[in-house]
Image (cartoon, rainbow, N blue to C red):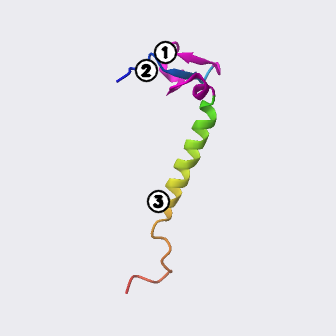
Amino acid sequence: MSDGSEKYWYNLTTGEVEKGFESPAIDRAGPFDTPEEAANALETLRERSRAWSEDEAREDDWGSSTRAGDHGE
């Protein structure tokens, strides 16, 4: 298993793609397999966040389709 030192990272502070652990962990998003994937990190993070939000909303709505006053009787 790789420790990430040979992977690519997106630096959230500078907006630069880095290989390995050039910056503190707090400033990095990744790891990514290619520099191109790392360069698109913000879009990837937005897509994942949107998907997680949609999943959470579905889970929150689970079972809410029962009618008011219907207690399963």
- Name the N-terminal-most of marks 2 and 1: 2
| Front position in the image: 11 or 4 | 4
Please state which amino acid type lies under the numbered disc 2.
Answer: Gly
Residue stretch in magenta: 14-39
Instruction: Check residue 4 in the rendering and tell me which mark sits there, or answer none.
Output: 2
Mark 2 crowd level (few <14, some 14–19, many ≥20, 10 Å Cα): some
**Residue 59 badge:** 3
Q: Gap between marks 3 and 2, in whole Å?
A: 33 Å
In terms of secondary structure, where does tag 2 sit?
loop
**Could you tell me if the residues under marks 1 and 3 are in contact, i.e. CB atoms within 8 Å?**
no
- The reply to whether dot 2 and dot 1 touch (C-beta < 8 Å) is yes
Q: Residue at x 50, y 64 (%)?
A: 61
Label placed on residue 1: none
Q: Nearer the viewer, mark 3 or mark 2?
A: 2
Q: Amino acid at mark 1?
A: Gly
The amino acid beneath tag 3 is Glu
Which image quarter is the N terminus in? top left
Which of marks 3 and 1 precedes in the sequence?
1
Q: Is residue 38 magenta?
A: yes
Find disc 1 in the rendering and name its residue.
20
Residue 65 located left or right of residue 2: right
Compare residues 56 and 18 and report the one nearer the observer.
18
Q: Is residue 50 above or below residue 9?
A: below
- Dot 3 lies on which element? helix
